[in-house]
Image (cartoon, rainbow, N blue to C red):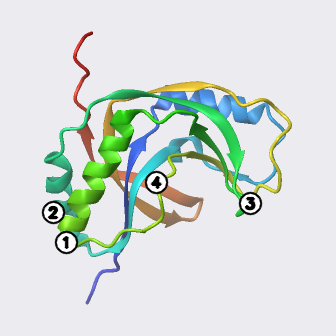
């Protein structure tokens, strides 16, 4: 008997308080589409797709070998892509985020994992199947990024759920 593969990805998990604040803001805006559950809010760093369960330990070891720095991610751009994905994005990319994504991508490729070739466009998905941008100004949310995680995407009776399989801290910034 074989076990089905797991749908895996690395991401920044949205802190619970921030997820609540974003969900509260979103609830006050007239949105079309299907909102992402607050507990599923995240920023994808690397999508791995279907992977055998045996890859969890090597992926955890790879993640533990990284030494990325913590940072503040300012989400201040509300946008919608042609595919109907409504999202928040940073107007300015923190160099630490760019470095984390680059380190992770390089290590995954060196370990033989296949990754998407499209450019890294960091965003937090608010809703899917959104037909237009809401007529509201972009909010601003400051996200203190202090960890990254390996997630599994699971389909449940209540919809898709993202479950953390492992988390790794981001190195605190040196005082200036």
Residue at 35% in and 80% down: 4
* Picture quadrant where residue 126 is located: top right
Q: Count neighbours of disc 3 (C-alpha within 10 A) and say few if under 14, some if 14 to 19, many if 20 or more.
A: some
Q: Under tag 1, what secondary structure? A: helix
Residue bearing mark 2? 58
Residue at 18% in and 67% down: 111
Reading the chain from its start, which is encountered first: label 3 or label 2?
2
Viewer-proximal residue, 1 or 5?
5
Instruction: Measure the C-alpha gap from mark 3 to mark 4.
Output: 21 Å
Residue bearing mark 3? 129
Q: How far across and down, in percent of the image, does residue 131 sit? A: 82, 56
Viewer-proximal residue, 163 or 119?
119
Reading the chain from its start, which is encountered first: label 3 or label 4?
4
Whether 93 is drawn above or below 154: the answer is: above
Check the image and name the residue furthest to the top.
176
* Picture quadrant where residue 157 is located: bottom right
Q: Under tag 3, what secondary structure? A: loop
Q: How far across and down, in percent of the image, does residue 153 sit? A: 44, 62
Q: Quick check: 76 left or right of 55?
A: right
Residue 54, numbered circle: 1
Instruction: Measure the C-alpha gap from mark 1 to mark 2.
Output: 8 Å
Q: Count neighbours of disc 1 (C-alpha within 10 A) and say few if under 14, some if 14 to 19, many if 20 or more.
A: few
Instruction: Measure the C-alpha gap from mark 3 to mark 2.
Output: 35 Å
Q: Are marks 1 and 3 in contact (CB under 8 Å)?
A: no
Instruction: Measure the C-alpha gap from mark 2 to mark 4.
Output: 23 Å
Residue 120, numbered circle: 4
Kindly report which numbered mark, 3 or 4, lies closer to the viewer in this rendering.
4
Q: Quick check: 33 left or right of 87?
A: right
* Picture quadrant where residue 13 is located: top left
Whether 35 is drawn above or below 168: the answer is: below
């Amino acid at each position: 008997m074989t076990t089905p593969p797991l749908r895996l990805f690395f991401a920044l998990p949205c802190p619970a308080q921030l997820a609540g604040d974003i969900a509260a803001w979103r609830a006050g805006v007239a949105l079309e589409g299907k909102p992402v559950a607050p507990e599923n809010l995240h920023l994808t760093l690397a999508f791995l797709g279907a992977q055998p369960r045996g890859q969890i330990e090597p992926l955890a070891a790879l993640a533990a070998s990284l030494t990325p720095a913590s940072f503040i991610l300012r989400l201040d751009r509300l946008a919608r892509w042609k595919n109907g994905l409504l999202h928040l994005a940073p107007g300015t990319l923190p160099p630490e985020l760019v470095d984390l994504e680059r380190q992770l991508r390089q290590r995954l490729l060196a370990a033989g994992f296949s990754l998407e070739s499209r450019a890294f466009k960091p965003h937090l998905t608010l809703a899917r199947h959104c037909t237009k941008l809401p007529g509201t100004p972009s909010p601003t949310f400051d996200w203190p990024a202090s960890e990254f995680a390996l997630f599994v995407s699971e389909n449940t009776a209540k919809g898709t759920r993202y479950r953390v399989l492992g988390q790794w801290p981001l190195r605190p910034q040196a005082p200036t």
